[in-house]
């Protein structure tokens, strides 16, 4: 089934729903689409990315098929959204649905993207199989009847909703959150009907069964990968004393940035040169900015965004310690990237993170700024020891999480499924 002319279609309907951390393709979903499609191409296969806006950046040689929607989430100004709606020519039901659901605070793009993808694929039969990147829209049920479909679920989004509600204050905020996540009703109906599901971790597999009631025999675990060609040690860059780095979508409770900030507030007294670089952007006047001001750590924390992967790698190279304080990760790209750069890592012992780190990071309890501080203190006091562990951690990532390894795992799994169906 897998020859040098095998054609893949990857449906990229979820990129627009993810707050991109670094640039237009580097939220977790964007990284996945970019790297997996590139790895497939490097192995000699033809790959089309079928995407709604905002369109992902792709490697050279990857064909992007654009399925325009209203792109309402390019702005949150009502007048601008109204103009986008009225300026769209030849509007259909999906355009009206997209506009009115967004108007009441929902996120309709996964459903409407799925419909547009279904319509496009109904006229194209050249694809050997289709991968859907977690849209889990109703249209996937129909597409599954026409093509071998592999449904990727990085993690069940109900986990995000739980944490958002847990940390939300006020009835209005909680009402908005429930409205935004209304698409979960669709996903909970679609997921059990998918024949072949790929998930990046055992933790996510268990959660997919728990939240979406999917038979675990349908779920195959294949980790995501790390670009070990870019994320690597750089001996030409000197480490800055007491520089820390974390990658976190600020004001998103799931990333646990609050606890790292509280640890900095303690550590600054013993380590007055300490500095935390956050790869991400805080919401102006939002929770994170207010907390930094309340803790009195403005001069110890800085934010950087719109960085290329190479620039992020350079930030790791100049950092002494990396911190991942997430409360949940379906697959933690920042974990693997820090380890690939051979930076001593402090990470929460939750969800998929231990599956990535192995024994090569300092594991801490979630929601514990005390654990973060104690680990920081221990690493600073025994730095040579932790650098040796970090170097072993890079070897671990190279052997198990490079994208070439991951792409071959996809091919082996998909080939076995297609072959078994052909024999029936």
Image: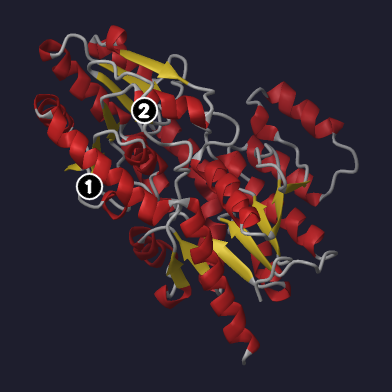
At x 73%, y 73%, the residue is 146
Q: Report the residue that reaches farthest toward the front.
A: 236
The answer to which of 421 and 67 lies nearer the viewer is 421
Q: Which colour scheme is used?
A: secondary structure
Task: Examine the rendered structure and indicate whether residue 14 appears above or below residue 270.
Answer: below
Crowd around label 1: few <14 · some 14–19 · many ≥20 (10 Å):
many
Q: Is mark 1 on a helix, strand or loop?
A: loop
Spatial CA distance of label 2 from label 1 is 21 Å
- Indicate left or right for 356 with 150 as reference: left
* Place of residue 370 in the rendered image (x, y in percent of width and height, measured from the top left): 13, 30
Mark 2 vs 1: CB contact within 8 A:
no
Task: Examine the rendered structure and indicate whether residue 172 appears above or below residue 267.
Answer: below
- Indicate left or right for 136 with 130 as reference: left
The answer to which of 337 and 13 lies nearer the viewer is 337
Q: What element carries label 2?
A: helix
Q: In which quarter of the image is residue 290?
A: top left
At x 61%, y 59%, the residue is 43
- Indicate left or right for 263 with 130 as reference: left
Identify the residue position indicated by label 2 in the image.
316
């Amino acid at each position: 089934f897998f020859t040098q002319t095998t054609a893949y279609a990857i449906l990229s309907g979820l990129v627009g729903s993810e707050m991109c951390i670094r640039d237009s393709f580097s939220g977790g979903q964007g990284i996945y689409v970019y790297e997996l499609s590139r790895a497939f191409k490097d192995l000699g296969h033809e790959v089309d990315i079928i995407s709604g806006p905002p369109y992902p950046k792709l490697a050279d040689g990857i064909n992007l098929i654009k399925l325009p929607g209203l792109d309402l989430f390019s702005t949150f100004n009502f007048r601008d959204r109204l103009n986008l709606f009225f300026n769209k020519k030849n509007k259909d039901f999906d355009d009206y649905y997209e506009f009115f659901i967004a108007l009441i605070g929902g996120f309709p793009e996964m459903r409407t993207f799925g419909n547009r993808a279904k319509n496009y694929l109904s006229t194209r039969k050249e694809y050997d199989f289709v991968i859907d990147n977690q849209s889990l829209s109703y249209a996937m049920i129909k597409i599954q009847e026409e093509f071998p479909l592999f449904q990727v679920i990085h993690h069940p989004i109900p986990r995000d909703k739980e944490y958002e509600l847990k940390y939300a204050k006020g009835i209005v905020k909680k009402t908005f959150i429930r409205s935004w996540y209304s698409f979960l009703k669709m996903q909970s109906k679609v997921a059990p009907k998918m024949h072949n599901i790929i998930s990046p971790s055992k933790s996510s597999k268990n959660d997919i069964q728990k939240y979406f009631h999917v038979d675990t025999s349908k779920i195959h675990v294949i980790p995501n990968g790390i670009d070990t060609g870019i994320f690597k040690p750089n001996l030409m860059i000197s480490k800055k004393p007491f520089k820390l780095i974390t990658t976190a979508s600020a004001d998103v409770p799931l990333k646990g940035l609050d606890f790292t900030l509280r640890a900095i507030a303690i550590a600054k007294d013993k380590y007055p040169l300490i500095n935390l670089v956050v790869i991400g952007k805080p919401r102006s006047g939002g929770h994170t900015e207010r907390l930094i001001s309340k803790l009195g750590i403005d001069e110890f924390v800085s934010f950087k965004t719109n960085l290329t992967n190479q620039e992020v790698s350079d930030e790791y190279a100049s950092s002494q310690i990396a911190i991942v304080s997430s409360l949940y990760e379906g697959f933690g790209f920042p974990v693997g990237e820090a380890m690939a750069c051979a930076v001593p890592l402090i990470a929460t012992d939750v969800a998929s993170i231990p599956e990535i780190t192995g024994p090569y990071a300092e594991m801490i309890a979630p929601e514990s700024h005390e654990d973060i501080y104690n680990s920081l203190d221990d690493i600073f006091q025994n730095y040579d020891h932790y650098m040796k562990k970090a170097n072993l951690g890079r070897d671990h990532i190279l052997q198990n999480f490079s994208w070439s390894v991951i792409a071959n795992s996809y091919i082996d799994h998909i080939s076995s499924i297609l072959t078994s169906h052909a024999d029936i």
